[in-house]
Amino acid sequence: MKDPLASIAAALAARRPVILQRWRAAADADPELTTASAISRAQFFDHIPEVLDAFERRLRARRPDERAEAARDERDGAVGHGLVRWQQGYRQRELMREWRHLHLILVDELEGLATANPGLDPGACARARRELATLTADGVCESATQYTRLQQVEASGRLADLEKALTDLGRVQSERAEVLREAAHDLRGSLGVVHHAALALKIDPASPPTQAHKITLLERGVAAMQDLLNDLISLARLEAGHERPVIAPFDAAATLRELCTTLQPLARSRGLTLLAEGRAALPVEGDATKLRRIAQNLLLNALKYTVRGGVVLSWEWEEAPDEARRWMLCVQDTGPGLTRDGGPIAHALKSATDEAQAVGERAAPGSAAAAATDPPPMLSALSAPSLAEPPGEGIGLAIVKRLCELLDASMELHTEPGKGSTFRVFFPQKY
């Protein structure tokens, strides 16, 4: 006699494409799930097909070791799902609601199966519902735990940059418990005074060469501190929720080409090439100012750490159906690539991108994991610092990530030590 739990597993496997499609439709209809609409179907399904495979194996398992192995695979899939959702810009509440929709759909499937097969063993149906409850509870816990861990990694990276800024400033020891943005504004004002004083001394014809050299070093140090404080102010505004997207039609190609022209002198001063490649026009909806900030942060990072060769800024449409069409911004350099000193946030992004790429490659056409013929996710990267210059682990990348979240954009990472890095950001064509 055939095992009734195995029959339930086989029925769920046969209904897999319908289950995944219903799950995506439920997410699209949920007004609180705004990020899901900005990613492709393969990226949305992510690790869930593997989780469902493990769930079905657990229903069919006869030995305790088989059930334990299937349970481990379920948990591993949930951990990977939380990792990728963080990289895609999901909020934690969105992640929880997503699991809720999946649970309700699977409950409906089990109830429909029991109704359509009145002879099915009631004990087997009860066991299947219990296993489903375990699956969902473990999935929520593991996904949320992984998401929280990555948030802590991101926070630790920002803390490292802030500590470096305070060390460089040296004498600055605040005795007041002010918020980060107010402190950064005060420090920027003080540095502005020092900067103007240094300029006045530099144009003094009586200044000896040694003094002029010291003043030049002072100016460079002050300029670096001003850049860092500007980043701190920008991050503080983003963290405080003071930034809002201003959505309007604009030509992304014109904006990016103008930015590339502006940064050409910096590239030439470092002996590097800076190329702009893409369509002559790229009409989209979005926030042109915030797009420029994202691209500028990535380009400055690439130019800073690239010693030989150059940087390429490019843009293009993603190959996808019109209703899910996105466009892509790409910054590619010939720098040192990501090394072990690349910082915890960069490592987390790279791991998440590798996971997303593996999901896309496993979603072969015609399989349940590939409910559509979506292309595998693109790769992306943030250049790692060279050995001559200690890395900044959080502020620049945190700003880019927060801006991407504001614009419902996703970023991905690909890098090879010694060969260079590529950073790609995907934006919706319309909002």
Image (cartoon, rainbow, N blue to C red):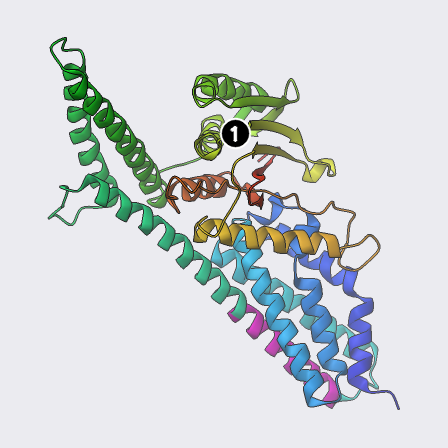
Q: Is residue 290 located in the magenta-colored stretch of the structure?
A: no
Which element is circle 1 on? loop
* Residue beneath the point at 66% across and 51% down: 357
Q: Residues within 10 Å of mark 1 (few under 14, many from 20)?
A: some
Quadrant where the C terminus is found in the figure = top right
Q: Is residue 87 above or below residue 221?
A: below
Residue at horizontal 50 percent and vertical 16 percent from the top: 261
Query: Which quadrant does the N terminus fall into?
Result: bottom right
What residue sits right under mark 1 in the picture? 308
Location of residue 180 by image quarter:
top left
The secondary structure that dominates the magenta segment is helix
The part of the chain drawn in magenta is 123-141
- Front residue of 409/413: it is 413
**Residue 364 image offset from top left, x and y in percent:** 80, 54
251 vs 56, left or right, is left
Residue at 56%, 43% (x, y): give it: 410
Amino acid identity at mark 1: Arg
- Residue 42 is situated, as x and y percent measured from the top left of the image, at 70, 51
- On screen, 353 above or below 50? above
Q: Residue at x 56, y 55 (%)?
A: 351
